[in-house]
Image: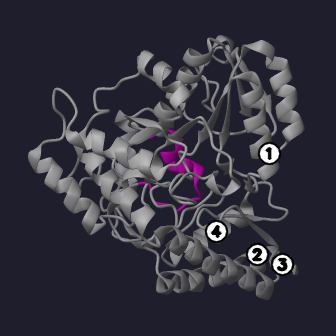
């Protein structure tokens, strides 16, 4: 039962709305919330519930405004409520979203993806990244008639038994045919392939190493070429998990600058600027297997997200949105590096500038990182202490400069608390 203010009965009146919503959630949702949305994994004081968003800003349930560097954990790439994207989505919604079959948007979007992504001969659509990576694995096994899949240690490919980072409810049989290698280690990859022998169905790799709680690593050309060579020698499928990075690094696919084409790519996150959509693109030799496997979902053909994706992908392909994100990321990175030197704080910035990770030296429990992001949050900037962050096309130089005012104060707080004398 709630009182007139929406506070659960038995709690102090006038409780902040976020706190009241958490208590209500605990009563009706296992754990209060689940997965990456569980705010207990973030420092004390971080909001869990949000009310609205615009451009690169979000407002929490209590009305606090933040410049957002998580972008909804990646899906927002052009800006929250981008007018052009939302106009296309609204126009389609007036016609309808779900029917007894797909709308013409499905064909238009598949055509756009195959025109935009050089290694794509066909496309099919899902709802989230786990759908897409799992479909890729299923297609690879169907095409080859084999079972073994090479997976990098620590890489995240989704949240179902074959790949979830949690072992709760997972059986050994769910992962019986996974063989692990070390990301960016060609020798380790080749050893894993030798272990698989004639049963190798595919190799899956993220666009770059973006494991949580550690420095990011860009894929090296040597590693990417080794993955291609292993698959070619075995007649296996090279799967690029581009769910997180796709359309933020290169409109043609994140390994396009490396000159290595995957056989299958999994896409989601930025594909429709926040509308729920994922995609698999593939090479022609996998077309028959992709048609044969049974993968489906009640909402996989919704027309509204596809209308949003048509605008999003064209904008990312045809404008300077991707280089703009990189430039804003470099501006933020350079500013924080200068501030860290000035305050004598040792920190590391890794990964692509538009998907940055910031970690502090000698910080195994993330005490420095937690203090840094909490102090920035109090000044209206939303960062994350151990997950890669995201820049969007909506971040402007003024937004970055405003954020740097907050990070400067936050780094000063780290220096005071921990007495750093680095750099």
What sort of colour scheme is used for the picture? Answer: one colour
Mark earlier in primary sequence (2, 1): 1
Instruction: Give yes or no for contact between labels 3 and 2 (Cβ–Cβ under 8 Å).
Output: yes
Which residue corresponds to mark 3?
Answer: 419
Distance (Cα) linking label 1 and label 4: 21 Å
Distance (Cα) linking label 4 and label 2: 28 Å
**Which residue is outermost to the left?**
94
Question: Is 50 a magenta residue?
Answer: no
* Residue drawn at point x = 10 percent, y = 46 percent: 95
Please say whether residue 276 is visible from this viewpoint. no
**Is the stretch drawn in magenta largely helix, strand or loop?**
loop
x then y, percent, for residue 127: 38, 37
Drawn side of residue 169 relative to residue 95, left or right: right
Which residue corresponds to mark 1?
Answer: 223
Q: Which residues are magenta?
A: 31-48
Which of label 2 and label 1 is nearer to you? 1
Distance (Cα) linking label 2 and label 1: 41 Å
Distance (Cα) linking label 3 and label 1: 40 Å
Q: Secondary structure at mark 4?
A: loop
Which residue corresponds to mark 2?
Answer: 417
Instruction: Give yes or no for contact between labels 3 and 1 (Cβ–Cβ under 8 Å).
Output: no
State the residue in front, 283 or 92.
283
Which of label 4 and label 2 is nearer to you? 4
Question: Is 38 a magenta residue?
Answer: yes
Instruction: Give yes or no for contact between labels 2 and 1 (Cβ–Cβ under 8 Å).
Output: no
x then y, percent, for residue 379: 51, 79
* Residue drawn at point x = 20 percent, y = 38 percent: 103
Quarter containing the N terminus: top left
Which of label 4 and label 3 is nearer to you? 4
Res. 353 mark: 4
């Amino acid at each position: 039962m709630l009182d007139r203010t929406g506070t659960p009965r038995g709690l102090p009146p006038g409780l902040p709305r976020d706190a009241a919503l958490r208590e209500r959630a605990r009563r009706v949702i296992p754990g209060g919330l689940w997965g990456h949305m569980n705010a207990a994994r973030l420092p004390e004081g971080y909001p869990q519930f949000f009310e609205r968003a615009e451009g690169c800003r979000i407002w929490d349930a209590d009305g606090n405004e933040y410049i957002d560097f998580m972008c909804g954990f990646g899906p927002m790439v052009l800006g929250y409520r981008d007018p052009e994207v939302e106009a296309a989505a609204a126009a389609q919604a007036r016609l309808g979203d779900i029917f007894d079959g797909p709308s013409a948007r499905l064909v238009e979007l598949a055509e756009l993806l195959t025109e935009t992504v050089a290694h794509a001969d066909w496309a099919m659509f899902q709802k989230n990244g786990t759908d897409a990576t799992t479909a890729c694995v299923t297609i690879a096994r169907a095409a080859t008639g084999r079972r073994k899949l090479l997976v990098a240690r620590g890489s995240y490919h989704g949240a179902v038994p074959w790949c979830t980072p949690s072992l709760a409810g997972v059986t050994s049989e769910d992962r019986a045919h996974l063989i692990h290698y070390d990301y960016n280690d060609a020798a380790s990859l080749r050893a894993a392939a030798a272990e698989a022998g004639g049963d190798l169905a595919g190799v899956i790799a993220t666009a770059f190493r973006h494991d949580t709680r550690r420095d990011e690593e860009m894929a090296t050309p040597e590693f990417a070429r080794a993955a291609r060579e292993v698959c070619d020698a075995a007649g296996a499928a090279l799967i690029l998990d581009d769910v997180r990075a796709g359309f933020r690094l290169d409109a043609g696919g994140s390994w396009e600058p490396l000159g290595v084409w995957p056989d299958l790519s999994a896409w989601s996150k930025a594909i429709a600027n926040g509308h729920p959509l994922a995609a698999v693109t593939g090479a022609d030799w996998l077309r028959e297997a992709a048609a044969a496997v049974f993968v489906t979902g009640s909402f996989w053909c919704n027309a509204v997200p596809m209308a949003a994706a048509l605008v999003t992908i064209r904008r990312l392909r045809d404008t300077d949105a991707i280089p703009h994100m990189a430039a804003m990321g470099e501006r933020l990175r350079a500013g924080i590096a200068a501030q860290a030197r000035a305050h004598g704080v040792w920190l590391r910035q890794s990964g692509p500038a538009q998907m940055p990770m910031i970690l502090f030296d000698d910080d195994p429990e993330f005490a420095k990182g937690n203090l840094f992001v909490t102090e920035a949050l109090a000044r209206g900037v939303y960062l994350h202490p151990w997950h890669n962050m995201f820049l969007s096309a909506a971040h402007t130089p003024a937004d970055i400069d405003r954020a740097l005012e907050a990070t400067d104060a936050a780094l000063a707080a780290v220096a005071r608390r921990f007495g750093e004398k680095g750099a």
